[in-house]
Amino acid sequence: MCGIVGYVGEQQALGVVVDGLRRLEYRGYDSGGVAVAADGALHTQKRSGKLANLDKALDERPLPASSAGVGHTRWATHGSPTDRNAHPHLDCRQRLAVVHNGIIENFAALRAELERSGHDLVSDTDTEVVAHLLEVEVTRGADLTRAMQAVCGRLEGAFTLVATSADDPSRVVGARRNSPLVVGLGEGENFLASDVAAFIAHTREAMELGQDQVVTITADAVEVTDFAGNPVDAARYHVDWDLSAAEKGGYDWFMRKEIYEQPRAVADTLLGRRGAEGELQLDEMRLSDEELREIDKIIVIACGTAFYAGLVAKYAIEHWTRVPCEVELASEFRYRDPILDKATLVVAISQSGETMDTLMAIRHARRQRSRVLAICNTNGSTIPRESDAVIYTHAGPEIGVASTKGFLTQVVACYLLGLYLAQVRGTKYGDEITWILDKLSQMPTEIQQVLDSMEPVHALARDLAQTQSVLFLGRHTGYPVALEGALKLKELAYIHAEGFAAGELKHGPIALVEKGVPVFVIVPPRGRDSLHDKVVSNIQEIRARGARTIVLAEEDDDVVAPYADQLVPLPKVPTLMQPLVATVPLQVFACELATARGHDVDQPRNLAKSVTVE
Ligand code: AGP
């Protein structure tokens, strides 16, 4: 997620803002910029890359002294990480500057409207439309606060906005919908920021903005309204976190914070994917419908957790498109002399977009004239740059080495690809696709429901903290979930953990089962032919051999309940969407067990966040 800082007060605005951005660097970003209002004008500087590039530019061209300013570190979503796309973005007259965190879902229509009325937009971002919409309101006589209220009423999606104006340097105005914005309350100064880490060096008195609210700060006052301009009371609170805790949003680990960000990450990955007629649209697809109709085989390539996301996606893609879909480890793919041609679509899944095994695999595929589509979380990284098309997950930066929100959003992005292929190839009717998209849009709520009931899983993890082996079983989409659950435990707790297809148990792995061995079992929804009953039989088999069964099943599954030493209830969701809820308790379990063992959850031994060597 982007970092935002706004300031009005007695200190030098530029120094306060840049220092605040530095304290938000942990959020991950690929460009940065600032704007200050001084001498009746706006003065801005912005650069792609790290803040050191911005510092260098500011040294070469210092900005004037000012009491009001805004700053931004950008995690690119719409538009690659370039100087031009860096924030702040300005209006035509260069009198207004705005920074933004989130996704403006209806930016394309707003951009077209602005360009039709003569506005000249120079970047590829969704944010820039806000600067010009503010200009329209200010030109009609509104002050910056009124202008922000009016503009927010026209925006769809998730946004935190902060703006400053050369015409009124005594104020900075912010707004938020579905994206955080906090106010820092000082003496003779006030702050706006994405999170408190940006200003707790100056003040620990804060105010959290609520949904659909606008805040105006001056050196001596803070006013909060709704988008209609009605005054609103916002609760003040004292920040007692240290800086490290503030960076993690109060969580002990980035990984835990990212587990709890998953509802938002999934919702953001789904944002802006539907056109005016409700049809699915993928703005970075860059492969024509004709090319997609020519595809007669799909090969998903990835590593680690991303590979397991591909295994989940296979079930949906084949079911929806009737196109054969293979899933391969990138490190094996190119050495087996795969059969590839231009009718093969190679789908590379990578959170970082820099995994060398995956990169080398797509280079091999392109040499064989196959088309390559990347599913990636890092805008502008190498793998999407070397692909024919890309679907970005909008999970925000994933800092914990163990991937969590990366996995869930990769599954969602793969589903969007499968539905898009079905739409283009006509293997699903529009209303069927709409039904599935509507079910997907309910998933953030379902995931949140699971997150709200994790205390028993925390207790289980602490109880099993010294265990030396854990098994995971699943069938159908539950099988790759079992593999992912085992990987989480391996990489965080450094113990033996293994995932199996439940049907494979009797072909060998059941020999591992003895008294007290903890076995997680992901049970498919009932009503799915005999799949559910077969897994119940598997649970009976391992219980008969003394296993401690931890059963993840639908909350009202009274058939399986008698065989569970511990039941982890899941919301009732369609089979293909069960991985989005079943994976979460396994992430929480691994995080908590590793914490109980005193491990560094964010930086597990021997591991790197991005494996840039083969
Ligand atoms: C996941 O928890 C691991 N950190 C690792 O398996 C990771 O998924 C794999 O290295 C692929 O990384 P990528 O998604 O950035 O390509």
Image (tube, rainbow, N blue to C red):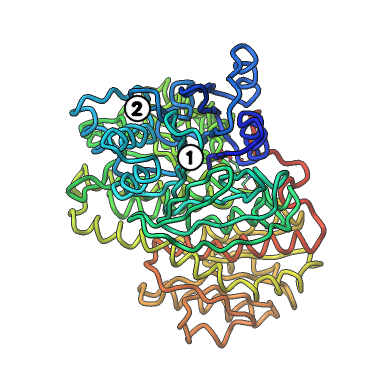
Residue 417 visible in the picture: no
Q: Which mark is residue 211?
A: none
Q: Amino acid at mark 1?
A: Ile
Name the spot of residue 458 as percent of width and height, x first: 68, 70
Q: Nearer the viewer, mark 2 or mark 1?
A: 1
The kind of secondary structure element at disc 1 is: strand
Residue 153 appears left or right of 42:
left
Chain-order first, disc 2 or disc 1:
2
Question: Percent position (x, y) of residue 534?
Answer: 47, 75
Q: Number of labelled discs? A: 2
Residue at 28% x, 22% y: name it.
120
Q: Viewer-proximal residue, 314 or 247?
A: 247
Q: Quadrant of ligand 1?
A: top right
Up-down relation of residue 422 to residue 84 (above or below)? below
Q: Quadrant of residue 296?
A: top left
Residue where numbered disc 1 is placed: 349
The residue positioned 54% from the left and 85% from the top of the image is 561
- Between marks 2 and 1, how big is the CA–CA gap? 20 Å
Q: Is 379 situated left or right of 602 in this image?
A: left
Callout 2–callout 1 Cβ contact below 8 Å: no
In the image, residue 131 sits, relative to residue 229, either above or below, namely above
Nearest the viewer among 567 and 602 is: 602
What x and y, as percent, mark residue 12? 65, 30
Label 1 crowd bin: few (<14), some (14–19), many (20+), radius 10 Å: many
Quadrant of res 25: top right
According to the picture, the residue beneath numbered tag 2 turns out to be: 341
Where is the C terminus found, in terms of image quarters?
top right
> Cβ of disc 2 within 8 Å of ligand 1?
no
